Amino acid sequence: MNKKQIIVDSILAVAIIVLFVLHFTKSSTASEAVSENASAVSAELPIAYVNLDSILVNYTFAVEANNQLMNDQENATARLRQQYRTLENEVADFQRKLENNAFLSRERAESEQQRLMKKQQDLQDLEAKLSQDLMKKTQDLTLQLSDTVDNFLNVYNADGRYKIIFTNNHRDNIIMADEAFDITKEVVEQLNKRYIKKK
């Protein structure tokens, strides 16, 4: 019985060792499979990003649109400044006439005062309208730029080489990324080529 017990214990010990080895070999093989799977997924899931600030600075359409907006703003400011200066001169002239009793009647003075007040209100309305017009132009150009870049990226990535394309404005969305994923330069070059052809 002693001999039989030793044989059974030996067989059980060998079986446990075999199971132990098989278990850890499978586990290691499974982790290698998971690792290979992760590599395959990362190879199948390429990503890229474009730096929006660089596009705004280097894309010819964006630069021209920005320059046009600045010109419009400067023209509106100059126009308003000139009209306010004219109004200030008219108000000063009115004050002088009022102090020197130059008006023939009180009604004439009140009429002139009403005219100047209306002119001031009209200028304030014009200022608000010009400001709204500039804001609308800015929004329209921003939307147009956004649509242009989005449409271009759809064409650019028609082959599906990128599964995700991020945008980044001065570390806004992406804090750190390998420059190998930055496709901004290529995107700007192709956007400019396309824009020049359309012109």
Image: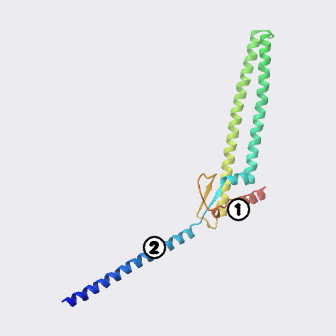
* Mark 1 in CB contact with mark 2 (< 8 angstroms): no
Residue 59 on image: x %, y %: 73, 54
Q: Quadrant of the N terminus?
A: bottom left
Q: How is the image coloured?
A: rainbow
Q: Indicate the amino acid at tag 2.
A: Ser
Kindly report the distance in space between the C-alpha atoms of the residues bearing marks 1 and 2: 39 Å
**Label 1 crowd bin: few (<14), some (14–19), many (20+), radius 10 Å:** few
Q: Quadrant of the C terminus?
A: bottom right
Mark 2 residue element: helix
Question: Which residue is tagged 2?
Answer: 31
Point 78% across, 57% down: residue: 196
Which of the numbered marks, if any, corresponds to residue 186? 1
Q: Indicate the amino acid at tag 1.
A: Glu
Point 74% across, 20% down: residue: 115
**Label 2 crowd bin: few (<14), some (14–19), many (20+), radius 10 Å:** few
Point 51% across, 70% down: residue: 38
> In which quadrant of the rendered view does residue 155 lie?
bottom right
Q: Is residue 129 above or below residue 105?
A: below
Residue 113 on image: x %, y %: 74, 17
Q: Is residue 142 above or below residue 158?
A: above
Q: Nearer the viewer, residue 176 or 80?
A: 176
Residue 74 on image: x %, y %: 76, 38
Residue 124 on image: x %, y %: 70, 28
Residue 81 is left or right of residue 158, and the answer is right
